[in-house]
Image (cartoon, rainbow, N blue to C red):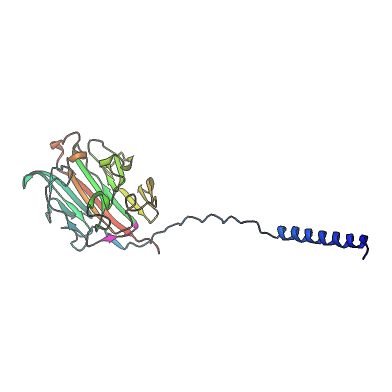
Amino acid sequence: MNKLTLYSVISILIIVSACSKESTVAQVPTPVTPAPTAPIVYEFESTPIWADEFDKDGLPDSKKWNYDVGGSGWGNNELEYYTKENLKNARVENGKLVIEAIKENFNGNSYTSARLVTKGKGDFLYGRFEIKAKLPAGRGTWPAIWMLATEQSYSDKYWPDNGEIDIMEHVGYDPGRVHASIHTKSFNHVIGTQVTTNMMVDDFDKAFHEYRLDWTPNKIEMYIDAKLYFTFENTGKGFAEYPFDKKFHLLLNLAVGGNWGGVKGVDESVFPQRMEVDYVRIYALKK
C-alpha cells in the first residue's frame, strides 16, 4: 500500500470514529421534569352519619349525649356548676336544644349551666360538622361549640398535646365577635402561639347561624353561614403541630365568667341566659 492510500484509509477511519462519537452524544435523552401532583380534593357525604334535630321535648337524647359534671372551674376559673339531667340547664323544647345558665347557688358555685358531650356516643375522625345555633348575650357569658380528642393518643398531658378545635366561641363583653381557633402543643394561648381568627355576627343573639367545621387530613376550615373565615393547614411536622388525625368528640356548653369570659367581670343582672341549638349534623369524609 502506498503512502497516499494509507493516509486515505486513516482519514476515513478518523472521520467514521468522530461521527460515531457525535452520534452517541446526540442519543443521550434530555431529563424530563415530572408534572406537579394535583392537590387532593376532599368531599363529604350528603347524608349525615350522626345527627340530632332536637325534635322530642324533654332531656337531651341519652343515646347521643353525655354530661360533663362539676364546678371546679374547668381549668379556666369558670363560675358555673355543670349539672346532669337537669331540665333547668339542658332541655329540648320547641324543636331546639336549650343550654341555660342560671344565677343560683349550687354546690359552692354561684351559677348552674350544662356541658353536653358526645364522647363514647359520637367520636369522629374527619368530616363536616354543622351546628345551627343562637347565642346568649351579656357580659360574663361564654358559649362554645368545640371538639376534644377522645383518647390521649400522643401524650398523657391531655391538653393541649392531643389537640382542641374551637368551632365557635363568643365572650359577652365583646358582642358579635365570633371566634374560631385550634390548640396544639406548638400552638396554644399559654405560650402565646394560638392560631385563631374572628368574624362579626351582628345578630348573634337574635338569629340562628350555622357554624361549620370541615376537617380533612390536609386542613381544618371553619365557616359561618357557609362563609369561610378560618383555615389551618397540616404542616406535616408531626403531632405537636397537627394532632388532628385521631378521633375527636363534640362539646356544647355555656360557661360563666372565667379567664376569658370574665375578663371584664360578670353582669349578674343579665341571667338567666341561654344558647339554643337548632340542629347538629355530621357528614363523613368520602373515601
Q: Is residue 248 left or right of residue 42?
A: left
Q: Which residue is situated farthest in the bottom direction here?
A: 1
Q: Which residue is situated farthest in the top direction here?
A: 264
Residue 274, horizontal then vertical, whole percent:
19, 46
Image quadrant for the C terminus?
A: bottom left
Tell which of 226 and 39 is nearer to you. Answer: 39
Image quadrant for the N terminus?
A: bottom right
Q: Is residue 2 left or right of residue 180?
A: right
Q: Is residue 280 magenta?
A: no
Q: Please tell me which residue is depicted at 21% across the width and 47% down the height of the picture.
A: 275
Q: What range of the chain is rendered magenta? A: 121-127
* Residue 208 visible in this rendered orientation of the protein: no
Q: Please tell me which residue is depicted at 15% across the width and 35% down the height of the picture.
A: 267
Q: Please tell me which residue is depicted at 25% across the width and 41% down the height of the picture.
A: 190
Residue 90, horizontal then vertical, whole percent:
16, 53
* Quarter of the image where one finds residue 189: top left
Q: How many numbered marks does the figure carry?
A: 0
Tell which of 102 and 180 is nearer to you. Answer: 180
* Residue 65 visible in this rendered orientation of the protein: yes
Residue 91, horizontal then vertical, whole percent:
16, 54
* Quarter of the image where one finds residue 263: top left
Q: Which residue is situated farthest in the front direction here?
A: 2
Q: Is residue 35 left or right of residue 22?
A: left
Tell which of 183 and 5 is nearer to you. Answer: 5
* Quarter of the image where one finds residue 205: top left
Residue 74, horizontal then vertical, whole percent:
16, 47
